[in-house]
Image (cartoon, grey):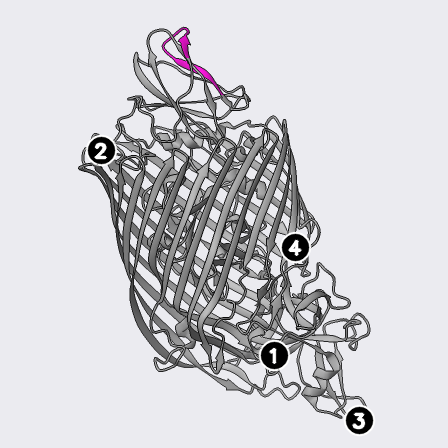
Amino acid sequence: MLDPRDKASQVALRTSTFVWNRWMASCMAAGVLLLPAQGTWAQESGGAPGGTPQGTGETPQGAAVQGTAETARGGAVQGKVTTSYGDPLPGVMVVVQGAKRTAVTNYEGVYAVKDLPPGQYTLRAEAEGFKSQRSRVSVGEAPVTLDFSLEMDLMNSEEIVVTAQVPDRKVRSSSAISTLSSEEIAARMPRSTADLMRIVPGFYVESSGGEVGGNLFVRGLPADGSYRYVSLMEDGMPVFDSTELFFVNNDIFVRVDENLDRVEAVRGGNAALYGSNAPGGVVNFINKTGGETLAGTFKASSATGGLFRYDANINGPLGNDWFFSVGGFYRYDNGVRYPGFPASNGGQLKANLQRNINLDSATGHARVTLKYLNDRNTFYLPLPLRGRFDSAGKLTDYDFVDGFPLEGTLTSPDGVNAQVPLPEGGRLTLPLDNGQQQVGGSVMAELRFYFPEARIEVQNNTRAMQFDHSWNAVLPFSLQDADTWARSVVGEGTPYRIVCSRLEGSPEFGTGGCGSQNNLVALGGQWLVQKPMSNISNQLKLTQYADLGPTQHTFTGGLYLGYYTAGNRWYFNDVVTDVLTRPHYLDLQVLDDTGAVVRGVTQNGFRSYLGSYTNGDGDATIIAAFLGDEVKVGDKLRIDLAGRVERNGYIQFVERTAGVDLGDPTTSADDNVTRGTGNIQRVGVSFTDWALSGGVNYALSDSASVYARSSRGYKMPLLDQLLTATNPSDPSFPRTPETLWQNEAGIKVGGPWYALAAVAYWMQIQNFPSQDARVDPDTGETRFVTVYAGKARTLGLELEGAIQPIKYFRGQGMLTLQNPRYSEFFEGAEDFSGNRIRRIPQVITDLSGTFMYENANLTVNWNYVGHRFSNNANTVDLPGFGQFNVSAGYTYERFTLSLQLLNALNSTGLTEGNPRVDETQGAQSDLFLARPVLPRRFLVSLSAQL
């Protein structure tokens, strides 16, 4: 449960006691400080900031006028704010428009604005999760009493969404937009950044790999994982200009903590206009900024699996129009799949400083945001399973192999600080316990000014980042019977033995804790990837508001510049282990007739040292221009049209490699070690493409609208593709961007106790690449394969809704139905046209019900993912699965106790197969590798508010 006094707790308020906090109001007050003297930054009408004078008493669309005025004493306005059920609402911000005065309701819902000169004023009461209301009042020497009763806004349709061509209310936007407030985020207690986005319709999320390294598939677009078609942003700027690189899923740059104010997710074709290479969607993580009053949250959490986490954020005024926010987290976690060392360890620190600026000709602000991240997380990969199939070959049931527990992992402590001989001498240390590690930070500067006389807004954002990213993991490729594998290596009739050489006494396989009753070995790899990365980008945006005859226009144009670098040092080694949780590295030894060791096939568990090595450095330059216009025709119709032109230039330097035998006679592991030759190849290429999107929104009422949109977008090739495709004549060499065509239409409607958004869409993508690191399970050879497949299309329907028919219950849910298929797909001699797009389900749903009574609440959540195919041939089938999550909480004064049971019934649903092998193994066998959802975890947290 969430504390109703914290801005990160307000939905819990409306879903429990409706007790809203001062923190939320103070954060809203920060926005009021930015209002120009004659208007707002973004009006509900969508017109110019100076278009409607403040304090005139006019009521914008969707704002109800309520309240009574009666005589009191003093030159002030005072009153009480309640919910529609009559409960007092603390933390509501009451704004005196035109006077730049605000007040925040106390715990009884009472507010007071004092020392107002006599005159006519319009007061606006607003609280996140409720529809804002306005009322006009006359103030004289005697005080005036004005009460408000706020109606719930179940899906935040009144919220101003900034991740759009023109900031506006969600209900009036011609795009598919989902928002998550800080309280909704905290109520879900997501295990990872990817897990947070599970609630967004049209998003299919794979988050079973741990806290980072998640995969997001949007609207059925074919991808090999990562966030290929979705841009992750912080405060409106990309966290990295490329949505993915090899071994980089962009959620490695984002952590969810108490600094986060809200998340805005835009889906569909309009997203291509907001960020580089984001044709499928944009997810904008918006941080808290300081408000008029000092506020803060301090939270301590613990969970099964040895999790200890501490979060904090404090924000507020510094005086003289200066405001600040600072916070972060530290977390230590052994992990729900304990690998023998801490699975996660590290934290993040964020801070921003803002100065509001009021000049004679302009009003605006300057803000600087800093972030430092030092964190590492184990990357969980597929686990050993044994399946059962029906007569048609479809997987009907499965269990972990004998001796392998539900909470197990194939990550081995034997791999921590393992030593690998280098061709030039010396040894390479493999820091497996670092997992996916990021050390670095970013700085962002924002300048924003509005010039009321010219009705022009200028905004410039500059962001720079630098991170050292490393990727360490043990990757299982295949499972084999131990003796069958050994004989295939040493030959039939050759004496051998398998030992756990790192265990005391080097016991033989099947004895002394070496091996298990399953008699299996896992052939895999231990890979280290070192990837230093940097990025600097700048976006300048100009907005002109104009009234042309009967229409109101918002013209927006701008220029985006970006430059990023990515280094690559890949060290791929092959290993063999037993099939236990936290497995042992095995050594296969050839014996003579007396049983003496003749030679070691493996050494310290390594089948091959540095079977693959990559050394490269690349950079990319981005320049893009965008221009658009939103037209308001009367009070109901809005039309927008916008375009973007972008050019990406890539340069990659790649070292050629060769194999060398290091000459150790005691092992075969060093017979073919890959080394750099010193011969550096330069590869350069550039691409230019364009995006165009047009939409229309028609208001059926103040709280209902219909919209339609059609668009063309693009996705540039990856810089890292030039690491493995250096010859322009190579079929895998990138030649042209991908092209996406999208059409969608939807309805948004809301009432006092319900809200619904429905979107139907069609999407087609052309020239998309199918690429993966694929491993031959027999030879262990790793190849990065890229195939430009042809066309794919998706038809889909997204539903998002919420109900609250009574005070004590609230329901919320989303449903995605889609049919993603390859329309043209040839891979070698294989024709996969008409097949389902791999890894993507046809059905996705997430449903929650919350029961509230006074200061307590209980939420039950269920999410379901339909069956998927793990490979393009549709021969490896992963069954659908569901998960239950339960949370409860209680608030007492400034303290909130929260309890959560994640994956309450311990579902073992398979989120993905084994993507590095499934394309080569053909039909699914009874013994296979796949990655299940994370096991059950019980979490408790205690938070306190300032």
Looking at the image, is mark 4 or mark 2 earlier in the sequence? 4
Within 10 Å of the Cα at label 1, are there few (<14), some (14-19), or many (20+) other Cα atoms? many
What's the residue at 70%, 82% (across, down)? Answer: 485
The C terminus lies in quadrant: top right
Q: Does residue 289 appear to the left or right of 592 in the view shown?
A: left
Label 2 SS? loop
Alpha carbon separation for disc pair 3 and 1: 31 Å
Mark 3 belongs to which amino acid? Answer: Asp
Label 3 SS? loop
Mark 1 belongs to which amino acid? Answer: Pro
Depth check, front residue: 467 or 750 = 750
Q: Nearer the viewer, mark 3 or mark 1?
A: 1
Residue 885 showing in the rendered view: yes
Mark 4 belongs to which amino acid? Answer: Gly
Residue occupied by mark 2: 452
Residue occupied by mark 1: 777
Alpha carbon separation for disc pair 4 and 2: 55 Å
Looking at the image, is mark 3 or mark 2 earlier in the sequence? 2
Question: Is residue 823 positioned above or below 215 on the image?
Answer: below
- In the picture, the disc for residue 593 is 3
Magenta stretch, residue numbers: 69-81
Residue occupied by mark 4: 335
Magenta span includes 116? no
Q: Are marks 3 and 1 in contact (CB under 8 Å)?
A: no
Magenta span includes 72? yes
Looking at the image, is mark 3 or mark 4 earlier in the sequence? 4
